[in-house]
C-alpha cells in the first residue's frame, strides 16, 4: 500500500485518482502509524516551503517521513514535495527542509517569467534504470523556486527554462519530481507507475 501524506498542502485528489486508475492500493492519511505501516510514501505539495514544513512539524509528520525514508522506505516527492526533500529553502526567508538529499531551493533569477508554468521538455540527464523503456517528452510544471542539488549524481533529469532546471532527483529509494506527473499525460503517468511498480515489487529505484 502506498500512503499519500496529507498535511493540508498537497494535490491529493489528482495523485490518488492517478494511482486508482492504474490499479495501485493507496491511502490518503496524516496518521503516523498508517505511514509507518505503508510500503511506500508519496509527499505531494502545493504552496510555500516554510508553510509546508510548519504543517508537517505540527502534525509530527516530518520526523516520521525522515525516519521511514532513512530506514529504506521508498519515498516520492512531487513538486513542492520534491523541494522538501532537500536541506533548505530561500523561499520567503530561510527554512530547513527534511534534509534527505543535500542541496538548496533557490529563486529563479533573471528576466524570465515566474512562476515557471506550463509544458516543458523533460531530458533524462543520465542513463538510469528508472527510465528503462520510458521515452523523454513534455511534462507539466508550476513552480517559482528550483532545486540546486549539491551532488550532480542526484539529478536524474532536467528541463530547460532559460538554463537547466532540476526536474527529477533521486538517490536509492528516494525520488523527487519537480513537475506534476499525475497531470503530465502519458509520460508523467509512466513515471508515476514506474515508482509504484518498483514499490509493489519491492525493487529499489537504482
Image: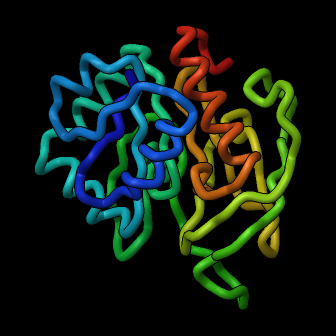
Q: Residue furthest bottom?
A: 111
Location of the N terminus (image quadrant): top left
The correct choice, above or below, for 203 with respect to 162 in the image is above
User: Residue 25's quadrant in the figure?
Assistant: top left
- Give coordinates of residue 203: x percent, y percent: 60, 10
Pick whichever, 83 or 35, lies toward us: 35
User: Residue 205's quadrant in the figure?
Assistant: top right
| Res 158 visible | yes
In this figure, what is the number of numbered marks? 0
- Give coordinates of residue 147: x percent, y percent: 59, 56
Tell whether 76 sits left or right of 7: right
Pick whichever, 31 or 173, lies toward us: 31
Tell whether 205 sits left or right of 11: right
The correct choice, above or below, for 177 with respect to 206 in the image is below
Residue at x 51%, y 49% (from the top left corner): 78
Residue at x 42%, y 50% (from the top left corner): 44
- Give coordinates of residue 88: x percent, y percent: 42, 54
- Give coordinates of residue 135: x percent, y percent: 88, 40
Residue at x 24%, y 58% (from the top left corner): 8
Location of the C terminus (image quadrant): top right
The structure's colour scheme is rainbow
Tell whether 195 sits left or right of 190: left
Residue at x 22%, y 33% (from the top left corner): 63
User: Residue 107's quadrant in the figure?
Assistant: bottom right
| Res 86 visible | no
Amino acid at each position: 500500500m502506498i500512503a499519500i501524506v496529507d498535511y493540508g498542502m498537497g494535490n491529493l485528489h489528482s495523485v490518488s485518482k492517478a494511482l486508482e486508475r492504474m490499479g495501485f492500493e493507496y491511502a490518503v492519511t496524516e496518521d503516523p502509524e498508517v505511514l509507518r505501516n505503508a510500503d511506500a510514501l508519496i509527499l505531494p505539495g502545493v504552496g510555500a516551503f516554510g508553510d509546508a514544513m510548519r504543517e508537517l512539524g505540527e502534525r509530527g509528520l516530518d520526523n516520521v517521513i525522515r525516519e521511514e525514508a532513512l530506514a529504506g522506505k521508498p519515498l516520492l516527492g512531487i513538486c513542492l514535495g520534491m523541494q522538501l526533500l532537500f536541506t533548505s529553502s530561500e523561499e520567503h526567508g530561510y527554512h530547513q527542509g527534511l534534509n534527505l538529499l543535500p542541496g538548496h531551493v533557490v529563486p529563479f533569477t533573471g528576466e524570465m517569467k515566474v512562476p515557471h508554468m506550463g509544458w516543458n521538455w523533460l531530458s533524462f540527464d543520465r542513463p538510469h534504470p528508472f527510465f528503462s523503456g520510458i521515452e523523454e517528452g513534455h511534462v507539466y510544471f508550476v513552480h517559482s523556486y528550483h532545486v540546486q542539488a549539491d551532488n550532480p549524481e542526484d539529478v536524474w533529469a532536467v528541463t530547460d527554462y532559460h538554463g537547466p532546471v532540476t526536474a527529477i532527483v533521486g538517490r536509492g529509494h528516494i525520488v523527487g519530481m519537480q513537475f506534476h506527473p499525475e497531470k503530465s499525460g502519458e509520460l508523467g503517468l509512466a513515471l508515476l507507475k514506474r515508482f509504484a511498480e518498483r514499490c509493489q515489487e519491492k525493487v529499489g529505484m537504482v
